Image (cartoon, helix red, strand yellow):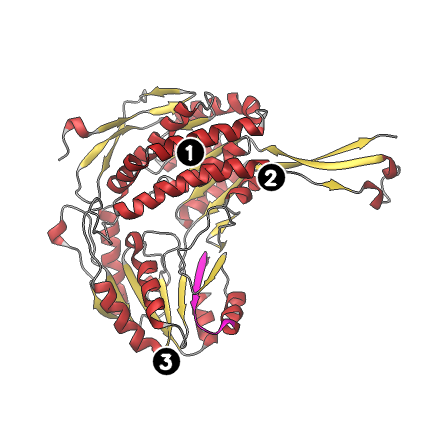
Amino acid sequence: MASAESEETGLLFIGGEWLPSRSDRWLEVRDPSTGQRLGRVSIASKDEASAAVDAAAAAEESWGSTPIHERARLLRALADRLAGDRVEMARRIAREVGKPIVDARVEADRAVTVYQLAADEARHLTGESFPADAYTYPAGNERRFLFSVRDPIGVVVAISPFNFPLNLLSHKVAPALAAGNPVVIKPTSAAPLTALRLAKHAEAAGFPNGVVNVVVGPGGEVGDTLVEHPRTRLVTFTGSTIVGKSIAEKAGRHAKRVILEMGGMDPFIVLDDAPMDVTVAAAVRGAFGYSGQVCTASKRLLVSDGVADAFVKAFTERAGKLKMGLALSEETQVGPVIDPAALDRMDRLVRDAVSHSAKLLLGGERAPELAPGYFYRPTVLDSVPVEATIAREEPFGPVAPIMRFHDIDEAVRIANGTPYGLQAAVYTNDLKRAFGLAKRIRAGGVHINDPTSLRWDALPFGGVKESGLGREGLRYAMEEMTEVKLISVNYG
């Protein structure tokens, strides 16, 4: 067990004050690599969640009227503080969610860039001018000037997942702040410590009291309170489709806007002319990066019959060489899954696939030598039928189901044959076929000769169907987080 001296106590951050919950309830945070306790965090009550919204609402008018250049200055100050703390932030991410330290450093660096980009993009959050005299009604348009502006939408609720506890949270917080909205953050209960450290940096950077708030607690209590509070105007959420739908339903009853980034069954499509070495390397990264616990992970490998045997052999050999170990080890390529429930889910999905005639080629079991950490061996399943649960249900773990197809039409049917549509990848040397597939695949993003996990922080990101509503990507999120107001001037 971790020593008491190394453990951290996390408090609520409401209206510029660090407070323990009056309910005296605490959440234990554990390291998935070791099972050791990292610390404990105060759990907010419904009243304290409401108080966080009230604090944000009290800052709404003043923050919304703060000049953009001042908001940008504070965002850059926050970015500078995160850059100076990147080593500790990366270690915290690795310990809190089991992300290999090499990947955790990338996340810490990307978060710095997100705040810098938000500061830059804020100046482009503009309206439009309209030629009034182009319209016959109402009369007198030749003496009018028409233009639109974008106003802050109001208090934003940011509900973040465990897998990118800093960067995905920053994708919600940075555009909200840049657009002039105060934020109430509810981090996942699996990884609240990173969010609380971010709030400390925001406080030190000089953000006014109430502009950034953090409360921790269960979604059914704290989350629902935030979503249904009369002063919150937009909820931005990343997580499961089941929870996202519930949030959308509750927000809809109060006419609130949502940005939802939910589940995915991202297909990685390999055509018969794909460059094999490049394709296999990308497929292994897409399937096993951060143990497959990524919304854009390559969750179904769709391979043409013509190259399937060669691909499966090379893919399995490469996957078998991945180094599994503790998240803080520099050599680790595959770390733990987030909790024991994830281990149970992997067991269930693999058993189900095998019962549906899939061939287990690698893994399919836990790693007892790394217990009490939550480790599942990289697993390869070949000839997975569409009836298997893993072909329809997001595994969110280090399990790669390979599904073979006969022709392009079958590949499209399989790719589109789930309720999800986040991202997809197509590997081929024939760009004509690649573009044809890109047009037919129902997804928010299609990457040709790049993995499904690719994302640009400043560009639009989101899914279709049950994978999401709205778009992230800084300027695009800012547009979601603002209201368009038309202003007319009669100078006649």
Q: Amino acid at mark 2?
A: His
Residue 254: name its quadrant.
Answer: top right
Please name the residue that numbered disc 3 is placed on. 306
Q: Pointer 3 and pointer 2: residues touching (CB < 8 Å)?
A: no
Q: Look at 28% across and 29% down and name the residue there.
A: 41
Q: Amino acid at mark 1?
A: Ala
- Answer above or below: position of 8 versus 283: above
Observer-nearest of 328 and 341: 328
Which x, y percent locates residue 258? 51, 41
109 left or right, relative to 142: left
Q: Is residue 160 visible?
A: no
Q: Look at 47% across and 36% down and name the residue there.
A: 174
The mark nearer the N terminus, 2 or 1, is 1
Which x, y percent locates residue 433? 50, 73
Q: Is residue 298 magenta?
A: no
452 left or right, relative to 193: right
Q: Pointer 2 and pointer 1: residues touching (CB < 8 Å)?
A: no
Q: Residues within 10 Å of mark 2 (few under 14, many from 20)?
A: few
The mark nearer the N terminus, 3 or 1, is 1
The answer for how far apart the CA atoms under marks 2 and 1 are is 19 Å
**Residue 124, numbered circle:** 2
Which x, y percent locates residue 171? 45, 41
Please name the residue that numbered disc 1 is placed on. 79
Q: Pointer 3 and pointer 1: residues touching (CB < 8 Å)?
A: no
Q: Residues within 10 Å of mark 1 (few under 14, many from 20)?
A: many
Q: Amino acid at mark 3?
A: Gly
**Residue 143, numbered circle:** none
- Answer above or below: position of 476 versus 390: above
Range of residues picked out in magenta: 418-431
